[in-house]
Image (cartoon, rainbow, N blue to C red):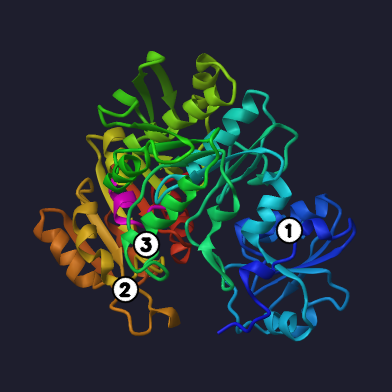
Amino acid sequence: MPKSHFSIDNVTSLASLKKGGRIHVIGVAGVAMAQLAVELTKQGFLVSGSDKDFYEPMGSFLRNSSVTLLKGYAAANVPSSVDLVVIGNAVSYENVEVSVVEERNLSYSCFPRMLHETIIAGKRSIVVTGTHGKSTTTALIASTLLKLGGDPSYFVGGIAKDLPMSLARGEGAYSVVEGDEYDSAFFAKVPKFSFYHPDICVINAIEYDHADIYPNVESIIGVFREMVVKMPANGTALCCIDYPHVRDLVQELRGKVAARIVTFGSASDAEISIVTREHVGLSQRVTARSENLGEFTFSIPMTGVYNAKNALVTVVVAMMSGYSLENACNAVATFKAVKRRQEIRYDKHGVTLIEDFAHHPTAVQETLSGIREAFPTRKIWGVFEPRSNTSRRKVFQEPYVSAFKSADEVVLCQVVSREIDANQDLLDVDTLSAKIGEGGTSSRALPDPKAIEEFLLEHVGTNDVIVVMSNGSFGGLPQSLESGLAQRFGN
């Protein structure tokens, strides 16, 4: 266990450092940490960073910056004159550079605390939370405010095509950040969003996830409850009551907390609700209504009811930020999706390859349902890698059975166990595949991405849509499939 040097109460404020101070980042190559490191250089600090490797796209991003990069972890990486060490949330107490921090009694911090100090402090804080839809909704809100001239500060936990970067400090009055419920560091076992102090928060969904740190769904509900309870009297919590746990939380807290609670979703009793949706290819036209606004319509270039709700709450936040309904709807209509969220990698000769980040059973189901709405007459392949700490475990064995019901063919990759899985019951992929098959959907489990690639390239035909889902690289399958399809069907 960490010694007394490390605790959430002992982190050092960035404000205590002088401009030109030296900062070292342990675990610099992640999407969030890399962009924080670069932002710190823009704010006048001298920054170095270490990681096991520097994979794309962050590798090129970091190499094109003034951050000093150190491959691998070593005690010598920590500068002798360092003023502050930022410790990534994937970095353990056993890391050799963490040992240096302790031995030399160095000042340290963590990503969410640094994010608050670099882009949130002094702004009106908009925080997007929930089990699903955080990255897309955050990108939607940030890009909408940017298009409308708001110049917000923002952080998106993904590569946002509609934004010049995924982390930036703007000059406007608002900050928009993705608020993750996962813990912040080995010494800060609290949600990242607990550092962000929202004035406006979006709760898109609450479901069980992160089985490696949360014992049950009640413990997850608890951290969302605490967030809303702490919001100020001029704050607003926008809550999607399509999810039972969110609905229950609204009923529990409404009238008992300082902040205003407003509900949205496709449920007819939501205060701002979706009335109809009409799909046109991979876009949809959505009609919504509220007591104050009556009926209004907007378009979003993404499929699925979940993306309709992401866009709906974006329109609401834009109006709360002082923009007109018409301008907010127009801005949403031109949104370019976050990478790996319904990202089309190949679409030629009657064959479409789509990559998506879905890994929770609900996200898999919603993604495939949205693709089915867009392509009602085409054959859909659902290709899935159980990779996250939760999806590899047996906790979702049964929910996954029904998650693939919108697909015609399912291909599952066998679980790759890790050290963290010791003494854990892992997902039985063969049994899952058999259960899916018993439900009437053809399914097979294959040993690895290479086997999946070979199978698909042999069996996919024209009029087929392949949806590749993972929260990781899937062994490079999306890229290799894209190349293989181009070779087989043509560029």
Report the side of 423 relative to 419 (left or right).
Answer: left
Q: Residues within 10 Å of mark 1 (few under 14, many from 20)?
A: many
Q: Nearer the viewer, mark 1 or mark 3?
A: 3
- Contact between labelled residues 1 and 2, with CB atoms less than 8 Å apart: no
Residue at numbered disc 3: 219
Instruction: Tell me the distance, in whole angstroms, between the alpha carbons under discs 2 and 3.
Output: 35 Å
Q: Quadrant of residue 435?
A: bottom left
Residue type at mark 1 is: Ala
Quick one: label 1 or label 3, which is nearer the N terminus?
A: 1
Point out residue 10 in the picture as x, y percentages from the top left corner. 69, 70
Q: Which mark is residue 37?
A: 1
Q: Is 357 in the magenta? A: yes
Kindly identify the amino acid type of the residue bearing the numbered disc 3.
Ser
Question: Which residue does the image show at 64% across and 60% down from the upper left?
Answer: 111
Percent position (x, y) of residue 429?
25, 70
289 left or right of 300 in image? left
Q: Secondary structure at mark 2?
A: loop
Q: Confirm whether the magenta stretch covers residue 141.
A: no
* Residue 248: % across, % down: 29, 45
Q: Which residue in the structure is indicated by mark 2?
A: 447
Task: Give me the residue at 40% from left, 58% from top.
Answer: 470
Q: Nearer the viewer, mark 2 or mark 1?
A: 1
Q: How far apart in space, not on screen, are marks 2 and 1 (Cα)? A: 38 Å
Tell me if label 1 and label 3 are in contact, CB under 8 Å: no
Is 222 situated above or below 429? above
Secondary element under disc 3, as helix, strand or loop, is helix
Q: CA distance from mark 1 to mark 3?
A: 32 Å
Part of the protein shown in magenta: 356-365
The image shows residue 114, relative to residue 212, as above or below, that is: above
Crowding at dot 3, Cα within 10 Å, few <14 / some 14-19 / many 20+, comes out as few
Query: Few, some or many C-alpha atoms within 10 Å of disc 2 (few <14, some 14-19, many ≥20)?
Result: few
Residue closer to the observer: 106 or 82 = 106
